[in-house]
């Protein structure tokens, strides 16, 4: 990634505000990367992807290589036909269509790389929350044994993989032992970093209890009851959400392709067209493009929706 930044430094250095947002996302995902390096890699990989699309589509349209030629004709040829009323020359229309797909792939790659740290931080926070009740029990046991808060998080930094809290605990330990922050500032800094609202609330409450000299054990036990109640409520809603997603999947990916194929075949037997496309192109577009991409989108949406109901 360093090499990417050296190549694209004049461009990346101008994206000050964007780099700040990327750095915040990287920090929340505990990715030890510079925002400028990551942004440069984002631009470079997106450019490479768009160039790859240019090569594949141009090759598919000029050479008879199956199934590349068929896919290229569906993607670029169909767009070129839509542009035919505006651009009479088919070659120019195909070039414009390829350019459009290059821009789409460039944007898709950039958005994917931009959202990856966000997705990773969300996954880390969900895993942390799923085991938070066990983490709270561990903290309560150590505090009852007379272990100070700093050493509790040092212990979690060592064995935290079991509770999916190691990156957070390790960051708190680094703030105290290497940056010289006191435990209250370290807890506050970590609360600002994490994406987990409930973990953020726990850290801020813990900081307040330690600062005021309150009973940390009672606070942890009370917070554990709150977490357990939320966990039980999330399980009930998750069941209802899964029922809805299963019906949606059955309709979209089983019934819909069959209906499209049957309708396209009937139209083909009658010698008709569906817009600028032939029935065969509609079937190919559905099988090779719509269903695969829709499946990917459905998986992402399902993961996001289900994750909302996790603890």
Image (cartoon, rainbow, N blue to C red):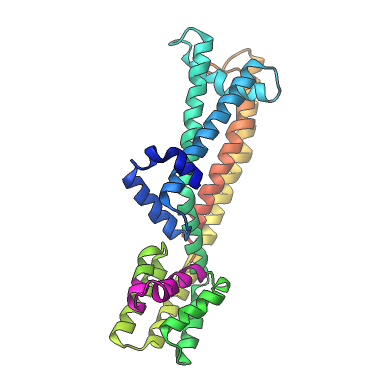
Is-magenta flag for residue 184? yes
Residue 111 at least partly seen = no
Q: Position of residue 9 (x, y in %)?
A: 41, 41
Residue at 50% x, 56% y is: 120
Q: Is residue 100 above or below residue 126?
A: above
Is-magenta flag for residue 270? no
Residue 269 at least partly seen = yes
Viewer-side residue, 104 vs 167: 167
Question: Magenta-highlighted stretch: main secondary structure?
Answer: helix
| Left or right of residue 12, residue 81 in this image | right
Viewer-side residue, 274 vs 67: 67
Q: Is residue 77 above or below residue 120?
A: above
Viewer-side residue, 13 vs 194: 13
Q: Position of residue 157 (x, y in %)?
A: 51, 74
Magenta-tinted stretch: 165-188
Residue at 63% x, 25% y is: 71
Task: Count every numbered label the image shows and give the total.
Answer: 0
Q: Position of residue 236 (x, y in %)?
A: 51, 65
Residue at 39% x, 68% y is: 190
Viewer-side residue, 45 vs 79: 45
Q: Position of residue 291 (x, y in %)?
A: 60, 36
Residue placed farthest to the top in the image? 88
Residue at 48% x, 68% y is: 129
Residue placed farthest to the bottom in the image? 145
């Amino acid at each position: 990634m360093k090499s990417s930044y050296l190549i694209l430094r004049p461009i990346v250095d101008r994206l000050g505000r964007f780099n700040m947002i990327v750095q915040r996302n990287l920090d929340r995902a505990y990715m030890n990367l510079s925002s400028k390096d990551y942004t440069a890699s984002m631009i470079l990989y997106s450019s490479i992807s768009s160039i790859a699309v240019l090569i594949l589509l141009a090759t598919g349209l000029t050479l008879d290589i199956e199934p590349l030629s068929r896919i290229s004709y569906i993607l670029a040829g169909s767009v070129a036909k839509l542009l035919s009323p505006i651009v009479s020359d088919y070659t120019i229309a195909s070039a414009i269509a390829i350019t459009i797909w290059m821009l789409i792939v460039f944007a898709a790659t950039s958005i994917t790389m931009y959202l990856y740290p966000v997705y990773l931080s969300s996954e880390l926070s969900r895993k942390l929350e799923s085991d938070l009740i066990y983490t709270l029990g561990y903290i309560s046991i150590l505090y009852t044994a007379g272990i100070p808060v700093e050493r509790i998080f040092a212990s979690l930094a060592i064995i935290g993989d079991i509770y999916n809290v190691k990156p957070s605990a390790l960051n708190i330990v680094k703030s105290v032992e290497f940056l010289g922050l006191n435990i209250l500032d370290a807890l506050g800094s970590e609360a600002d970093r994490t994406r987990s609202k409930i973990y953020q609330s726990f850290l801020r409450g813990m900081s307040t209890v330690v600062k005021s000299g309150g009973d940390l054990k009672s606070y942890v036990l009370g917070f554990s009851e709150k977490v357990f109640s939320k966990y039980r409520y999330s399980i009930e809603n998750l069941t209802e959400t899964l029922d809805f997603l299963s019906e949606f999947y059955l309709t979209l990916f089983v019934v819909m392709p069959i209906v499209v194929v049957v309708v396209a075949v009937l139209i083909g037997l009658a010698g008709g067209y569906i817009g600028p496309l032939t029935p065969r192109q509609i079937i190919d577009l559905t099988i090779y493009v719509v269903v695969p991409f829709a499946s990917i989108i459905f998986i992402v949406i399902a993961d996001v929706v289900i994750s909302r109901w996790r603890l």
